[in-house]
């Protein structure tokens, strides 16, 4: 079994990421975000399970690996710090292995559990923390089992205290749901105060299953949302908002970040010209 894969976000032609590898430590994710894509390609996507024999096989794989650019992104289809990690510590063990073999690491998470591993993250790591809203009630609907936005902010403070580069993903941006610009400005202002190193954003890419969850949770806004997506385009099996609307949303957020002195990039939108720096934050790797 090959655990480390070439990073390939569903062969999206709009991805602006540089070459890197990818590892998902768990299959499935208990955070159960209603907008999540994994349920369209992972059976029981919200029921996480460890990958059998992962640590031993990963060690063997790393011994054989002779890549020139040893950068791995953990994880893109499951949060490496979801609740099960507290007990199993598989992410911690993987980090130890990657460090032993001289890899550089990009981590994406919504969990403050990441602060348990500060000792391993101090060098050659960039952490991306996703915050879709500061509104804890809304966050609880969108990301029912993930730590609250305030716990994520606390985690960012601690990461920064340890001089670990931090990106924040305002991702996804969903029209009528979390695109309140006053609240977004408040969030960006806080991020600037925390001196985060880079902000990444992306609009929601719709699939049938996540749309169904949005319709259940936001029945009164759903029709408006659906109409927008029906006017949009279909790319790599996802429904995208109309291009001009996506461009407007990303440009507005970029402008907001600029006003507060923050670096910005859009993700899987194809708008290279909006990116101040490499989209995934890998430019922050030492
Ligand atoms: S944390 Fe990420 S992988 Fe997990 S459910 Fe949420 S969006 Fe999906």
Image (tube, grey):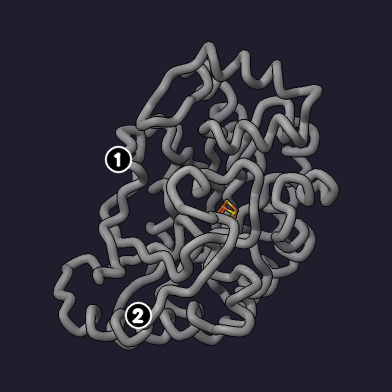
Task: Work out whether 223 lies above or below 105.
Answer: above
Q: Position of residue 252 (x, y in %)?
A: 61, 27
Judge left or right: residue 260 versus residue 40.
right
Q: Is residue 166 visible?
A: no
Q: Which image quarter holds the C terminus?
A: bottom left
Q: Determine the residue located farthest toward the right in the rendered image.
A: 137
Q: Position of residue 17 (x, y in %)?
A: 34, 47
Q: Position of residue 120 (x, y in %)?
A: 49, 84
Residue at numbered disc 1: 11
Q: Which numbered disc, 1 or 2, marks the residue that appears first in the sequence?
A: 1
Mark 1, Cα crowd under 10 Å, few <14 / some 14-19 / many 20+, is: few
SS category of the residue bearing label 2: helix
Residue at numbered disc 2: 98
Q: Is mark 1 within 8 Å of ligand 1?
A: no
Judge left or right: residue 65 versus residue 40.
left
Task: Work out whether 14 lies above or below 6.
Answer: above
Residue displayed at 55% across by 63% down: 79
Residue displayed at 28% across by 84% down: 101
Q: Is residue 43 visible?
A: yes
Residue displayed at 43% across by 62% down: 284
């Amino acid at each position: 079994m090959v655990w480390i894969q070439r990073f390939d976000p569903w062969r999206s032609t709009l991805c602006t990421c540089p070459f890197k590898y990818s590892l998902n430590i768990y299959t499935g994710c208990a955070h159960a975000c209603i907008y999540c894509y994994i349920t369209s390609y992972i059976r029981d996507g919200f029921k996480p399970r460890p990958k059998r024999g992962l640590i031993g096989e990963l060690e063997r794989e790393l011994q054989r690996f002779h890549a020139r650019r040893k950068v791995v992104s953990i994880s893109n289809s499951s949060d490496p710090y979801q609740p099960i990690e507290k007990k199993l510590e598989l992410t911690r063990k993987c980090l130890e292995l990657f460090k032993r073999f001289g890899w550089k690491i990009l981590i994406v998470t919504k969990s403050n559990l990441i602060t348990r591993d500060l000792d391993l993250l101090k060098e050659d790591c960039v952490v991306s923390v996703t915050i879709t809203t500061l509104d804890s009630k809304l966050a609880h609907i969108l990301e029912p089992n993930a730590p609250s936005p305030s716990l994520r902010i606390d985690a960012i403070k601690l990461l920064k205290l340890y001089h670990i580069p931090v990106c924040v993903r305002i991702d996804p941006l969903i029209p009528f749901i979390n695109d309140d610009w006053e609240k977004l400005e408040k969030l960006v202002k806080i991020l600037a105060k925390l001196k985060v190193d880079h902000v990444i954003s992306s609009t929601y890419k719709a699939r049938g299953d996540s749309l169904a969850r949005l319709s259940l949770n936001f029945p009164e806004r759903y029709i408006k949302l659906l109409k927008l997506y029906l006017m949009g385009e279909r790319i790599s099996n996802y429904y995208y908002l109309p291009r001009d609307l996506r461009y407007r949303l990303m440009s507005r957020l970029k402008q907001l970040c600029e006003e507060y002195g923050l670096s910005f990039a859009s993700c899987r939108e194809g708008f290279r010209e909006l990116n101040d720096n490499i989209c995934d934050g890998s430019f922050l790797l030492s």
